[in-house]
Amino acid sequence: MKKKNEKHDILADIGHYTVNNVHLKKVLTPQEFDLFDLIRYENNVSNGYISYTLIQLEVGIIQRNLIAEIKRNLIKLGFISIVDNNRIKGTKYTVNYTIVRDIVQVLNNERNSVNRLRIADNYRTNKGLKSIVGNRISKFENTNFDISVDVDRFEKNKENKQVNCKEVILLNNLFEKLKNKEITERQYNVQSNNIKASAKQRIIFNKDKNQWIIEMN
């Protein structure tokens, strides 16, 4: 049984055992990752309010304008949302674990190393942010790393993997917005129906997991 203030790593629960997850480093810059990790840590061990001073102390980013830019990037990516601003305590965030989990699982399910970079790069640039792995893609595309598939990596527990697609990510992203009251239920229904209609696979809402998934035959 977990203690009340014990850090609970949801990403570890789905099989990603290290906090410094290698796939997140393909989507986030080092500073974005450090701030994201601080936010999810503080959400687990404190009241969740994070001040500029705490960020400067824990992450080492001194410039406030840079901190503000990094926070905006994490919000654009859908990784966090602002819950409350307090002039004394700081800002309280919620971590959108469904979105984070989905992009990590898509990357984890991709066998090809270069394709993983492409997926991460597309996710980031589609949110209006600059590429951080474009140089690596240019260097390694059309090489053996781009052509070969390392099957052995994916044999272990492959029967337990949940396959995702971009429509699943979009639907779970939309569901997070509904939960955070960023959109109305009517907007959610219209947009989710449009996304499902564009998908090649049949996508259903799993009430037990409280998330959209691909229906497996």
Image (spheres, rainbow, N blue to C red):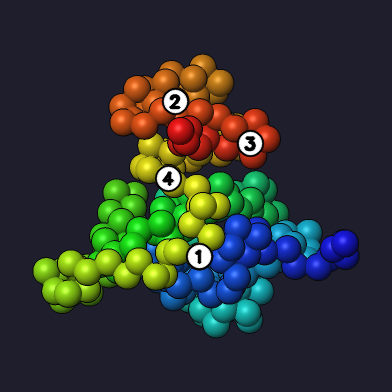
- C-alpha separation, residue under disc 4 versus residue under disc 3: 15 Å
| Amino acid at pointer 2 | Ser
x then y, percent, for residue 142: 11, 69
User: Which of the pair 4/146 is nearer the observer?
Assistant: 146
* Mark with earlier residue (1, 2): 1
- C-alpha separation, residue under disc 3 versus residue under disc 1: 26 Å
Mark 4 — residue? 164
| Amino acid at pointer 1 | Lys
| Other residues around mark 4 within 10 Å, as few (<14) / some (14–19) / many (≥20) | many
- C-alpha separation, residue under disc 1 versus residue under disc 2: 33 Å
User: Which of the pair 72/202 is nearer the observer?
Assistant: 202
In the rendered image of this protein, does residue 90 appear above or below residue 204? below
x then y, percent, for residue 124: 33, 56
Q: Quadrant of residue 134?
A: bottom left
Q: Is the N terminus in the top left, top right, bottom left or bottom right quadrant?
A: bottom right
> What kind of element bears circle 2?
helix
| Amino acid at pointer 3 | Asn
Residue 15 visible at all: yes
Q: How many marks?
A: 4
- C-alpha separation, residue under disc 4 versus residue under disc 1: 18 Å
Q: Nearer the viewer, mark 2 or mark 3?
A: 3
Q: Nearer the viewer, mark 4 or mark 3?
A: 4
* Mark with earlier residue (2, 3): 2
x then y, percent, for residue 144: 17, 74
* Mark with earlier residue (4, 1): 1
Mark 1 — residue? 156
Mark 2 — residue? 192
In the rendered image of this protein, does residue 206 appear above or below residue 68? above
* Mark with earlier residue (4, 3): 4
* Mark with earlier residue (3, 1): 1
Mark 3 — residue? 210
In the rendered image of this protein, does residue 203 appear above or below residue 110? above
